[in-house]
Amino acid sequence: MNIVLLGAPGSGKGTQAAMISGRYGTPHISTGDILRQAVTDGTSLGLKAKGYMDRGELVPDEIIIGVVEECLREEDCERGFILDGFPRTVAQAESLEESLKEMGGSLDVVLNIEVEDEEIIRRLTGRRICGKCGRIFHLLFDPPRDEGVCEVCGGDLYQRADDTEETVRRRLEVYKEQTAPLIDFYKRKGLLRNVRGEKSAADVFEHVQETLEGIRG
Ligand code: AMP
């Protein structure tokens, strides 16, 4: 299946995408992860993207569209893919439609994960990540035993530069201005399915799975 996950930052798209990928074996393409890796590796893509990411703004369409096209042409995407964090603008959505048409495919479903703003701010500003093993903690919902230290590997925990309250609020504004119009875009195409995202990841996944099974028929 060709799936797009839509939703504000912190709505749980990444978690659900990983769960869908684990259940159905479909490759998970996260543009945020690709860009963060490029920044860590210091590639030219990373150098171009870093400033936008740190400010909570979108990387220009012409940069990210090429990156995703390349991923979709990989052999492992032939039997389906899960896009997480792309498209984020109407121009990206139109270009995705064109690329898929050229490859003889189309989207099967767009899952829109809905979460209230205040919950998003709580989730993102409390997130802490281990710099060594990547384990994600949350100061309120899943706190580490010792402050600032990963209990799995002893690594130091850090906060993503774009998870500070000011930047999270900016990311939410950007989402509303540039990405939320995609809800209508995909509704008009009959592809949109809404999923409430406030519950636990397992509960949300249950609803996601029911929705996907309904589409697979
Ligand atoms: P995410 O992890 O999906 O929240 O993405 C982190 C950051 O990467 C975003 O705030 C943007 O700066 C950038 N980014 C990720 N995906 C896209 C995209 N499709 N278009 C533009 N910028 C993106």
Image: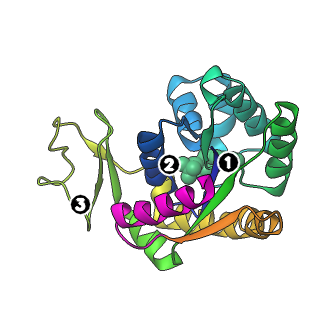
Residue at point 49%, 63% (across, down): 210
Residue 101 is situated, as x and y percent measured from the top left of the image, at 86, 38
Residue 75 is situated, as x and y percent measured from the top left of the image, at 64, 21
Determine whether the residue tagged by mark 1 lies in a helix, strand or loop: loop
Q: Is residue 207 above or below residue 157?
A: below
Q: Amino acid at mark 2?
A: Ala
**Quick check: marks 1 and 2 in contact, CB under 8 Å?**
no
Q: Quadrant of residue 49?
A: top right
User: CA separation, marks 1 and 2?
Assistant: 12 Å
Q: Amino acid at mark 1?
A: Phe
The residue that label 1 is drawn on is: 86
Residue 201 is situated, as x and y percent measured from the top left of the image, at 37, 61
For ligand 1, tell me if the residue under mark 1 lies within 8 Å: yes
Determine whether the residue tagged by mark 2 lies in a helix, strand or loop: helix
Dot label at residue 47: none
Q: Is residue 138 visible?
A: yes
Residue at point 62%, 57% (across, down): 215
Q: Which residues are magenta?
A: 197-217
The dominant secondary structure in magenta is helix
**Quick check: marks 3 and 1 in contact, CB under 8 Å?**
no
Of residues 34 and 201, the one drawn nearer to the viewer in this rendering = 201
Determine whether the residue tagged by mark 3 lies in a helix, strand or loop: loop
The residue that label 2 is drawn on is: 17
User: CA separation, marks 2 and 3?
Assistant: 20 Å
For ligand 1, tell me if the residue under mark 3 lies within 8 Å: no
Of residues 90 and 77, the one drawn nearer to the viewer in this rendering = 77
Q: Is residue 209 above or below residue 1?
A: below
Residue at point 82%, 63% (across, down): 189
